Amino acid sequence: ADLVRRLMPQQVSVLYLFFDAQLQPELSRTFSWEELFQRQRASPFICRASRNSQTYLDIVLEGLVENRFIEAEGERYGLAPGFDTFEHVTFYRLGEYRKRQI
């Protein structure tokens, strides 16, 4: 099993684009880039300054594909096989992690 040591907050925010309204991963669904961009524009998990940025989506998707969290097939993107096998994940809100360490 892969061990994920660190995901950048931007990567976590884009992963949420692949989740449904109940925050469950849509494992068998694929999305076009346009669908993901529309989801990004409405996502509460992506900072407002980045929601309308096509470059933001391109760069973060590229990193998630390289790290094998997302698969790209032609013009479609989906969660990579095995995404649902991660056993433990902890997310902190931006700015919260350091506050807890101090």
Image: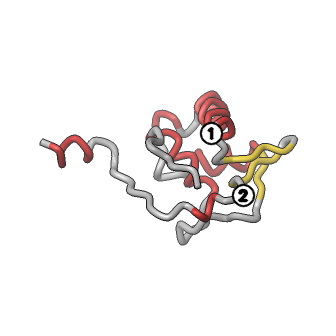
Q: In front: 31, or 37?
A: 31
Find the residue positioned furthest to the bottom.
22
- The kind of residue tagged 2 is Pro
Residue appearing at x 53%, y 51% in the figure: 43
Q: In front: 33, or 92?
A: 92
Q: Is residue 15 left or right of residue 5?
A: right
Residue appearing at x 70%, y 53% in the figure: 80
Residue appearing at x 64%, y 47% in the figure: 69
Q: Position of residue 3 (x, y in %)?
A: 51, 49
- Around disc 1, counting alpha carbons within 10 Å, would you say few (fewer than 14), some (14 to 19), or many (20 or more)? few
Residue appearing at x 87%, y 41% in the figure: 74
Q: Which residue is disc 1 drawn over?
A: 67
Q: Position of residue 1 (x, y in %)?
A: 58, 55
Find the residue positioned furthest to the right.
74
Query: In the drawing, what numbered circle is on residue 75?
Result: none
* Res 9 → quadrant: top left
Q: Quadrant of the C terminus?
A: top left
- Around disc 2, counting alpha carbons within 10 Å, would you say few (fewer than 14), some (14 to 19), or many (20 or more)? few
Against 77, residue 25 (above or below) is below
Q: Position of residue 66 (x, y in %)?
A: 67, 35
Against 84, residue 73 (above or below) is above
Q: Position of residue 17 (x, y in %)?
A: 60, 53
Q: In front: 71, or 37?
A: 71
Mark 2 or mark 1, which has the lower sequence index? 1
Against 59, residue 27 (above or below) is below
Q: Which residue is disc 2 drawn over?
A: 81
- The kind of residue tagged 1 is Asn
Are discs 2 and 1 less than 8 Å apart at CB? Answer: no
Real-space Cα separation, disc 2 to disc 1, in angstroms: 13 Å
Q: Is residue 12 left or right of residue 19?
A: left
